[in-house]
């Protein structure tokens, strides 16, 4: 069955791949968090400083959800103070083409920077 048919049929809507994808990476912050981790911003404090207007509690929530969905890994280094770094899993890396396309679309369609 084609995606279009699945997503139109109310009895099959729970199988809609777009809904599944948006459940995993949807919302205001997750794509931004993922892209920052992808480009090498991988520590909580750095992520917090590099994502404008995100609260620390929201960043924590988003990171936990992404980790639970096996999109990112969280590695704790046994140092004092403890250091935590995030990285993309194989499943997370498979999302990069989607994020790159979002970036391209945004660059093409946003108003020019002054």
Image (tube, rainbow, N blue to C red):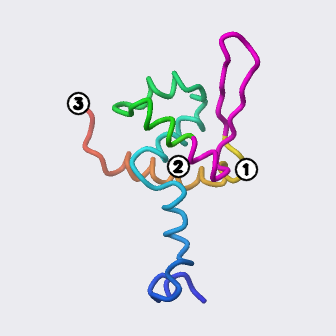
How far, Cα to Cα, is label 3 from label 2? 24 Å
Q: Per the image, is 85 magenta? A: yes
Residue drawn at x 46%, y 41% as measured from the top left: 32
Where residue 11 sits: x, y (%)?
A: 50, 89
The quarter in which the C terminus is drawn is top left
| Label 1 element class | helix
| Label 3 element class | loop
How far, Cα to Cα, is label 1 from label 2? 16 Å
Residue drawn at x 60%, y 89% as measured from the top left: 1
How far, Cα to Cα, is label 1 from label 3? 38 Å
| Label 2 element class | helix
Mark 1 neighbour class, 10 Å CA radius: few under 14, some 14 to 19, many 20 or more: few
Where residue 36 sits: x, y (%)?
A: 53, 35
Please identify, in this view, whether the residue under mark 1 or under mark 2 is nearer the observer.
1
Please identify, in this view, whether the residue under mark 3 or under mark 2 is nearer the observer.
2
Tag on residue 114? 3
- Sequence-wise, the earlier of marks 1 and 2 is 1
Q: Per the image, is 84 magenta? A: yes
Please name the residue that numbered disc 1 is placed on: 90
Please name the residue that numbered disc 2 is placed on: 100
Look at the image and give the residue range highlighted in magenta: 64-87
Where residue 19 sits: x, y (%)?
A: 49, 69
- Sequence-wise, the earlier of marks 1 and 3 is 1
> Depth check: 11 or 18 in front?
11
């Amino acid at each position: 069955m084609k995606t279009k048919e699945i997503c139109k049929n109310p009895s099959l809507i729970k199988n809609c791949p777009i809904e599944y994808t948006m459940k995993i990476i949807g919302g205001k912050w997750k794509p931004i968090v993922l892209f920052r981790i992808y480009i090498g911003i991988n520590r909580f404090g750095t992520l917090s400083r590099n994502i404008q207007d995100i609260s620390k509690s929201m960043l924590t929530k988003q990171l936990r959800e992404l980790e639970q969905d096996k999109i990112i890994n969280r590695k704790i280094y046994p140092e004092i103070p403890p250091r935590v770094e995030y990285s993309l899993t194989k499943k997370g890396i498979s999302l990069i083409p989607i994020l790159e396309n979002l970036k391209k679309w945004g660059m093409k369609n946003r108003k020019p920077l002054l």
